[in-house]
Image (cartoon, helix red, strand yellow):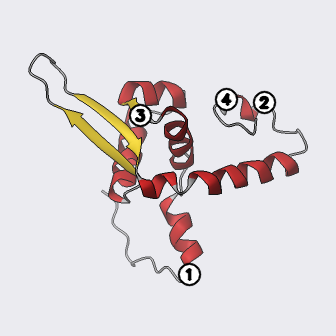
Amino acid sequence: MYQRKLNATIRCPLEHALNMIRGKWNTRIICVLSFYKTLRYTDLKNELIDVTDTVLATTLKEMIANKLINRRQYNEDNEILPRVEYSLTDKGQSLVQILENICSWSKVYSDGENEDLFKQCHTCEHY
């Protein structure tokens, strides 16, 4: 695994917040879980369409470590594979309004040039 030579220094609260939601998939996962409330891994992967298993698993682990999402595993005797569900924590849910505001801003300033790119974003009330 890659090890940084120097520790990253965060100099302001905005850097800290952006560090927690960085990456291509974090905001999408938050939006999808906000809409559906709780999803199993396969359903979440299907909603994200083109994410790989490796990237999704890594991203979910990071988001769990940052306390943005919950992972709940059900160990029932009659299930061969244990059922695992993901949902937003209160901390993750608190980001939804912020992301909706960014989404609204993007819609205003996109000038319609990215409409084809926004097709996947069907759960957001802004599109």
Whether residue 126 sits left or right of residue 79 in the image: it is right
How far across and down, in percent of the image, does residue 37 sit? 46, 36
Query: Where's the N terminus, which quadrant?
Result: bottom left
In this rendering, which labeled residue sits more in front, label 4 or label 2?
4
Could you tell me how far apart the alpha carbons at marks 4 and 1 are, in whole angstroms? Answer: 33 Å
* Amino acid carrying mark 1 in the image: Cys
* Amino acid carrying mark 3 in the image: Thr
Q: Name the residue under label 3.
A: 38
Could you tell me how far apart the alpha carbons at marks 3 and 2 are, in whole angstroms? Answer: 28 Å
Q: Residue extending furthest bottom?
A: 11
Residue 50 appears anywhere in the view = no
In this rendering, which labeled residue sits more in front, label 1 or label 2?
1
Q: Nearer the N terminus, badge 4 or badge 1?
A: 1
Q: Which mark is residue 116?
A: 2
Q: Which mark is residue 79?
A: none
Whether residue 57 sits left or right of residue 27 in the image: it is left
Q: Residue extending furthest left?
A: 77
Q: Mark 1 points at which residue?
A: 12
Q: How crowded is mark 3: few (under 14 residues within 10 Å), some or many (20 or more)?
A: some
Q: Which of 94 and 68 is in front in this view?
A: 94
Could you tell me how far apart the alpha carbons at marks 1 and 3 are, in whole angstroms? Answer: 32 Å
Give above or below for 117 relative to 1.
above
How far across and down, in percent of the image, does residue 43 sit? 43, 25
Give above or below for 22 relative to 126.
below
Q: Nearer the N terminus, badge 3 or badge 2?
A: 3
Q: Residue 122 carries which label?
A: 4
Q: Dot 2: what SS? A: loop
Q: Nearer the viewer, residue 95 or 11?
A: 95
How far across and down, in percent of the image, does residue 100 sit? 67, 49
Could you tell me how far apart the alpha carbons at marks 3 and 4 are, in whole angstroms? Answer: 17 Å
